[in-house]
Image (tube, rainbow, N blue to C red):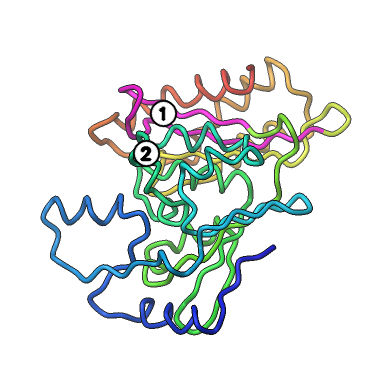
Amino acid sequence: MSVTLSAAKQARLVPAVQAKGGRIIAGGTLIVADLNYGADSVALITLDRLGLDKIAVKGGKVTLGAMVTMAAVARDRRLKFLHPVADSIGGPAVRAMATIGGNLFAPSPYGDMAAAFLALDAEISFHDGKATRKLPIETFLAQRRKLQKHCVVSISFAAPSAGTFHYVKVVRRKPVSASVVTIAAVIPQKAGKIKGARIALGAMAANAIRARKAEAALEGRKLGDDIIAAAAKLIAAEASPADDAYATAWYRREIAPVHFARLLAA
């Protein structure tokens, strides 16, 4: 299944995408916080009547409407591999409101679900005011600032094989905090060797990024202590973390290899 918009729904969506002086609101966990902290008052345009809150799993493909909440992901047994990701985002009240579409635009050190989608090689469908377009998530995240004027419709990806998706979020304050480092990885193996590894990092750049050098260190090799150690040394090689209230850039670089090695060893 793919999320499609009827002519009537597109007629309601196009003015929202093209509206000047208005901001599209999904769960509101980002925009309402901005308003509470003194951002200029704006018109808020809600998407809750467009039917973008559906979850479909068919033929190994997962399609999530942009208005699917973290709580809905955490409840769905078909998405068990994503439960640790959803459960790591905010508290129960936040998860009941925060949407996966909105999480794509969450600034660092937030956006944990976006990191998971990057590891899963997701495809983003969005409406640009004229038609629905699709982009690989890596391209979408790189162009995120420009695409803020568009509306995400759905996220789709192939469900990972059992035991291949791995996730850890490192925080300074439990149970609820922004990320110090988020690591999401899909590590498939064929004939005992790693094939097609994808590793994504959150809170290590302005948006979620791939750790390509670490992926290359794993590719075609058997997962063992020496290979894990070699990949761990490269996990932050392409990162550009920032200092913030949760951690310094130096600290993030120091602990990323430790938690990546622990994640794969486990």
Query: Residue 73 in the image: x percent, y percent?
Result: 53, 43
Q: Position of residue 61 (x, y in %)?
A: 72, 53
Residue sticking out furthest to the left: 38
Magenta region, residue range: 166-189
Q: Nearer the viewer, residue 182 or 195?
A: 182
Within 10 angstroms of label 2, few (less than 14), some, or many (20 or more) residues?
A: many
Q: Is residue 260 above or below residue 155?
A: above
Q: CA distance from mark 1 to mark 2?
A: 8 Å
Q: Which mark is residue 253?
A: 1
Residue 264 is drawn in which quadrant? top right
Q: Nearer the viewer, residue 151 or 49?
A: 49
- Secondary structure under the numbered disc 2 in the rendered image: loop
Q: Quadrant of the N terminus?
A: bottom right
**Badge 1 vs badge 2, beta-carbon distance below 8 Å:** yes
Q: Is residue 36 left or right of residue 143?
A: left
Horizontal and vertical percent position of residue 217: 67, 32
Q: Residue at x 45, y 81 (%)?
A: 129
Picture disc at residue 241 = 2
Q: Label 1 amino acid?
A: Arg
Whether 180 is among the magenta residues is yes
